[in-house]
């Protein structure tokens, strides 16, 4: 029994949402490298998966993440930039920018994702995809963003519930 792998930790790393986040990071990274809109790249990949059965379909949560980040990129980047200490967003490794963008978008908009999960997933992605220093750096930045996330979510909910044309 002691020789069996830890099912809990391997399940977490292989979960559908984890894979969706990783693919979202990959797409955001690629879109930046190719200097194209992430939503345009996403549409290209969805179309390709429909035409070619050998191409894996795009997970619905990957779509939510990429479209969400693309729609709110200025605010997400502004938030990240405001919590960087002695750094600018452009100086960060591109993969770290993509990871932070996904995590900040989730913290602000994904009401079904607890903040601790968004941060933990970002740290895990940084461990797998980036430098040795990136996991602790990303954890530190997101630790500060987590403090304002409830207010941002509440403001967004209030905006959605207020009719724009109220008389």
Image (spheres, helix red, strand yellow):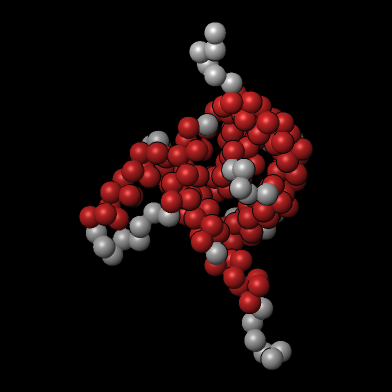
Q: Quadrant of the C terminus?
A: top right
User: Residue 7: percent from the left, percent from the top?
Assistant: 63, 77
Instruction: Classify residue 38 by image quadrant.
Output: top left
Residue 8, horizontal then vertical, whole percent = 65, 72
Q: Position of residue 34 (x, y in %)?
A: 39, 41
Judged from this view, the residue extending furthest toward the top is 167
Which residue appears at 22% of the width and 55% of the height?
51
In the displayed structure, would residue 4 be above or below residue 51?
below
Q: Residue furthest front?
A: 167
Q: Is 53 in front, or is 142?
A: 53
Report x, y in % for residue 119.
68, 50
Point out the residue furthest to the left here. Answer: 51
Compare residues 68 and 22 and report the one nearer the observer: 68
- Identified at 64% across, 26% down, the residue is 158
Which quadrant would the N terminus be assigned to in this image? bottom right
The image shows residue 12, relative to residue 152, as above or below, that is below
Res 79 quadrant in image: top right
Q: Is residue 62 left or right of residue 83?
A: left
Q: Is residue 119 above or below residue 67?
A: below
Q: Is residue 74 left or right of residue 55?
A: right
Q: Is residue 155 visible?
A: yes
The image quadrant that residue 142 belongs to is top right
Q: Residue at x 56, y 44 (%)?
A: 102
Number of callouts: 0
Is there any visible trace of residue 26 in the rendered image? Answer: no
Q: Residue at x 43, y 46 (%)?
A: 63
């Amino acid at each position: 029994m002691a020789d069996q792998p830890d099912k809990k930790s391997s399940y977490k790393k292989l979960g559908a949402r984890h894979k969706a986040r990783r693919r979202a990071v990959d797409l955001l990274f690629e879109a930046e490298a190719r200097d194209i809109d992430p939503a345009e790249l996403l549409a290209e990949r969805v179309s390709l998966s429909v035409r070619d059965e050998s191409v894996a379909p795009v997970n619905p949560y990957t779509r939510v993440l990429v479209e969400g980040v693309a729609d709110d990129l200025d605010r997400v980047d502004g938030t990240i930039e405001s919590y960087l200490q002695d750094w600018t967003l452009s100086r960060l490794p591109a993969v770290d920018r993509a990871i932070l963008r996904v995590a900040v978008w989730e913290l602000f908009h994904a009401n079904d994702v607890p903040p601790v999960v968004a941060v933990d997933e970002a740290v895990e992605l940084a461990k797998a995809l980036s430098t040795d220093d990136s996991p602790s750096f990303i954890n530190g930045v997101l630790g500060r963003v987590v403090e304002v996330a409830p207010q941002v979510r509440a403001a967004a909910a209030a905006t959605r519930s207020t009719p724009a044309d109220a008389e």
